[in-house]
Image (cartoon, rainbow, N blue to C red):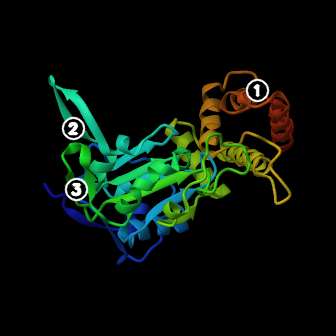
Amino acid sequence: MTAIVKKFPINTTFNIAAPAAMMVEGFEDETHPSIPTKKDYVFRNEHLRDVIAFISNPLGDALYLTGPTGSGKTSLICQVAARLNWPVHQVTCHGRLELNDLIGQFMLLNGSMSFVHGPLAQAVRDGHLLILNEIDLMDPSELAGLNDIIEGQPLVIPQNGGEVIKPHPKFRLIATGNSAGQGDQSGLYQGVMQQNLAFLDRFRLMEVGYPEASIEQSILKSVLTGMGVPFDSVMENLTEKMIQVANEIRRLFVGGTDGAGELSVTMSTRTLVRWTNLMIAYKRAPNALAYSLDRALTLRAEPAQREAIHRIAEDVFGDSWGDDA
């Protein structure tokens, strides 16, 4: 059964300022089990612009999102898809993942061997989004098998009797990675491999950094109100300082042009949300801010770095850092 295409107004669909006439295509059926769960999300205009331009007309490209860990690369795509009723297949890549794992394999079903289509074959056939997360962890020789698919050639499955799947017009291939495919020069992301230039040449790229402070505060406000915590002036001031701490940690993690950063851990937006959740969960603990920061991040840092991060927090919060209230 062919899915019915539907046009969505960009302004109301993504809650951003845009002319009412600006539309983007998605699907009418909102019941497909592979549609991501819709969550509260603050879209950044420049990122949304790039994603909508790609899914509207990829022009023979795939899309590669690069950026630091926890910056929201995958969640951006999933929340766009959730609002457009666009089914998504996600695969987390690793060094032992093979192309055949994406295409499909024979499995024992009801006492007999049957070919089960993998996420790539399903997405190509049905017009879904395929997200290959951490693509820079996968063997580049395996990824080279995707070249023809990206260019719109049929997917041929020799192991299933030479089955040929013509790509659906709505099929899109999207990759995410902490590197841009050139390997990791920082040494912080173990297992990252340099990718084949011919493969990378088939992608358009976009960089997803950590959100601006105002956006992260909107995210934390949504988290807190969702937990029934009033976002009053006290909480507003508190979250502002938490974001200051996060940004200082990130600055020391990334480093500058003169060399690598001083920290080997970072405060991603995901970790910042975890810190906020744990702060409320451990609100009766002595110095809940420090207690929850340990459990959100610093217990996996080296002792000297853990102490440095706590000093950063103490400098930002001042006397209130040791305040149990």
Residue at left offset 20%, top offset 50%: 162
Q: Considering only vertical position in the picture, is 21 above or below 266?
A: below
Q: Secondary structure at mark 3?
A: strand
Q: Secondary structure at mark 1?
A: loop
Decide if residue 78 is on the left or right side of residue 219. Answer: left
Mark toward the start of the polypeptide (1 vs 3): 3
Decide if residue 87 is on the left or right side of residue 302. Answer: left
Q: Which residue is mark 2?
A: 115
Kind of residue indicated by mark 2: Phe
Decide if residue 26 is on the left or right side of residue 292. Answer: left
Which mark, by number, is residue 165? 3
Mark toward the start of the polypeptide (2 vs 1): 2
Residue 19 visible somewhere in the drawing:
yes
Q: Which residue is mark 1?
A: 287
Mark 2 packing: few (<14 Cα in 10 Å), some, or many (20+)? some
Residue 238: x percent and y percent?
71, 43
Residue at left offset 56%, top offset 51%: 177
Residue 197: x percent and y percent?
55, 62
**Residues marked 2 and 1 touching at CB (< 8 Å):** no
Q: Nearer the viewer, residue 256 or 325?
A: 256
Mark 3 packing: few (<14 Cα in 10 Å), some, or many (20+)? some
How far apart are the two marked residues, 2 and 1, measured between alpha carbons?
Answer: 57 Å
Residue at left offset 45%, top offset 48%: 142
How far apart are the two marked residues, 1 and 3, measured between alpha carbons?
Answer: 59 Å
Residue 257: x percent and y percent?
82, 60
Mark toward the start of the polypeptide (3 vs 2): 2
Please state, as top left, top right, bottom left or bottom right, where the N terminus lies in the image: bottom left
Please state, as top left, top right, bottom left or bottom right, where the C terminus lies in the image: top right
Residue at left offset 55%, top offset 64%: 206
Mark 1 packing: few (<14 Cα in 10 Å), some, or many (20+)? some
Q: Nearer the viewer, residue 139 or 253?
A: 139
